[in-house]
Amino acid sequence: ECDWSSDVCSSDLGRLYVAEMRDYPNAKTSGAIRRLEDRDGDGRYETSVVFAENIPFPNGVLPWNGGILVTAAPDILFLRDTNGDGRADERTVVLTGFGTGNQQLRVNGLYLGLDNWIYGANGRSDGEIHAPGRTNRVSIRGRDFRFRPATGEIETLAGRSQFGLAHDD
């Protein structure tokens, strides 16, 4: 069930999405997202399907709003299977403008904070990010960021994470 007021959807509980950087280090668009599923409830994933292909160096996945957000510089993509065939047939750019330099130092590490913002690591890259169709650009040079996919709001954060972010007590 989805709670549209908070942009969170739990319909994919029990599924595991894996970013496959099959294109590393040279190709440009042969990365993929694979969906693993435990259909018999024994705690082991026995089903594996390619959920999406032709993604440039995907390195992070976060379930959101009945689909997944994928970090794939210069973009953060939203992918969703709308017809139930196990493959993403909806593909939308949520944010764009992330640096595309070193494949190991790109946007990554998405997680949903307690405040319902999605946090991300800049990967020690530069960029002027924005939601498609919006004119306001936010420089993330030397900064990490947080955003709300449903509204396009973006804020910078102190820090310059290389890979991943974490919160603790």
Image (spheres, helix red, strand yellow):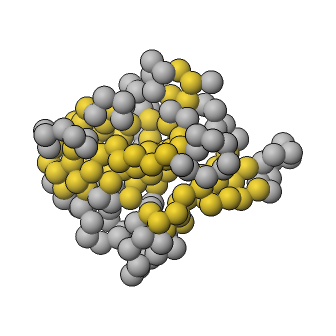
Is residue 10 positioned above or below 135 on the image?
above
Q: Front-most of 155 and 71?
A: 71
Counting from the top left corner in percent of width and height, residue 103 is at 35, 70
Is residue 145 positioned above or below 34 on the image?
above
Is residue 100 positioned above or below 81 on the image?
below
Which quarter of the figure has residue 147?
top left
Q: In which quadrant will I find the N terminus?
A: top right
Q: Front-most of 39 and 162?
A: 39
Q: Residue furthest bottom?
A: 26
Q: Front-most of 167 and 87?
A: 87
Q: How many marks?
A: 0
Counting from the top left corner in percent of width and height, residue 131 is at 25, 41
Counting from the top left corner in percent of width and height, residue 120 is at 35, 46
Which quarter of the figure has residue 125?
bottom left
Residue at image location 80% in from the left, 53% down from the top: 44
Which quarter of the figure has residue 123?
bottom left
Counting from the top left corner in percent of width and height, residue 28 is at 38, 74
User: Is residue 154 in sight in this rendering?
Assistant: yes
Residue at image location 51% in from the left, 73% down from the top: 22
Q: In which quadrant will I find the C terminus?
A: top left
Residue at image location 70% in from the left, 41% down from the top: 14
Q: Is residue 99 left or right of residue 118?
A: left
User: Is residue 143 in sight in this rendering?
Assistant: no
Residue at image location 30% in from the left, 38% down from the top: 146
Is residue 32 positioned above or below 158 on the image?
below
Q: Residue furthest top?
A: 5
